[in-house]
Image (cartoon, rainbow, N blue to C red):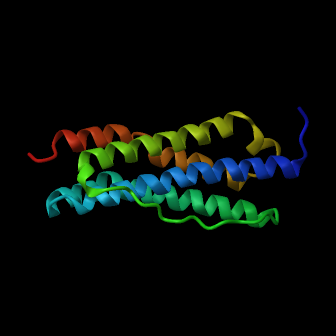
C-alpha cells in the first residue's frame, strides 16, 4: 500500500496521540491512588511511579506537539481524564495505571516497528518515542514491588 508523506505523518500523530491519552489515564490513576494513601506510602508511590509516568507523559506530549509543529500539522491538547471512583482502592488504581502505561509503550513499539518514524518522521520524533518507552520500561515491576509492601 502506498501512502503520501502527509498521510504517514498524520498516522504517526494519531498513534502517538492514542499512546499519550493512555499515559494521561495512567497518570490520573496513579494520582488517584496517591490520594488514598498515607503520607509515607504516598511519597514512595510518587518516587516509584508518579514521577516516571509524569515524565513519560510530558515527553509524549512534547514529542507530539514538536512533530506537529515541524510539519505544519494541527496539534491537539491533551485533557486530564477522570481516574474513576475512589472506592476502587489504591491497588486497583495502580494496576489500571500500569496496564495503561504498558499499552502506551506497546503502541509506541508498534509504531516504531512500522518504520513510519524513519520513513516520514525525523530524528527528534524517533528520540522522543524511544525516551517515552524508556521511561515506562520496568514500571510494572516497580508497581508490583510497591503494592506488595503496601500497608506494611
Relative placement, left or right, of 28 versus 3 is: left
Which residue is nearer to you in this view: 85 or 97? 85
| Image quadrant in which the C terminus is located | top left
Relative placement, left or right, of 9 versus 59 is: right
Where on the picture, by quarter, is residue 65?
bottom right
| Image vertical order of residue 96 relative to residue 86, above or below | above
Q: Position of residue 27 (x, y in %)?
A: 41, 57
Residue occupying the point 60% across, 37% down: 109
Q: Position of residue 96 (x, y in %)?
A: 37, 44
Relative placement, left or right, of 15 versus 147 is: right
Residue occupying the point 86% across, 52% down: 6
| Image vertical order of residue 121 relative to residue 72, above or below | above
Q: Residue furthest left?
A: 152
Q: Position of residue 72 (x, y in %)?
A: 82, 66
Label total for image = 0
Where on the picture, by quarter, is residue 54?
bottom left
Residue occupying the point 73% across, 35% down: 114
| Image quadrant in which the N terminus is located | top right
Q: Position of residue 57 (x, y in %)?
A: 50, 58
Residue occupying the point 66% across, 59% down: 64
Where on the picture, by quarter, is residue 112?
top right
Amino acid at each position: 500500500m502506498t501512502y503520501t508523506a502527509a498521510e504517514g505523518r498524520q498516522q504517526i500523530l494519531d498513534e502517538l496521540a492514542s499512546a499519550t491519552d493512555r499515559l494521561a489515564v495512567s497518570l490520573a490513576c496513579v494520582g488517584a491512588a496517591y490520594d488514598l494513601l498515607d503520607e509515607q506510602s504516598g511519597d514512595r508511590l510518587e518516587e516509584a511511579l508518579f514521577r516516571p509516568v509524569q515524565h513519560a507523559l510530558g515527553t509524549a506530549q512534547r514529542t507530539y506537539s514538536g512533530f506537529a509543529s515541524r510539519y505544519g500539522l494541527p496539534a491537539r491538547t491533551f485533557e486530564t481524564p477522570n481516574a474513576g471512583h475512589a472506592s476502587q482502592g489504591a491497588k486497583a488504581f495502580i494496576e489500571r495505571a500500569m496496564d495503561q502505561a504498558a499499552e502506551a509503550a506497546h503502541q509506541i513499539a508498534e509504531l516504531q516497528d512500522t518504520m513510519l518514524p524513519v520513513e516520514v518522521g525525523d530524528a527528534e520524533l524517533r528520540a522522543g518515542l524511544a525516551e517515552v518507552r524508556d521511561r515506562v520500561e520496568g514500571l510494572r515491576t516497580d508497581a508490583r514491588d510497591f503494592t506488595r509492601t503496601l500497608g506494611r
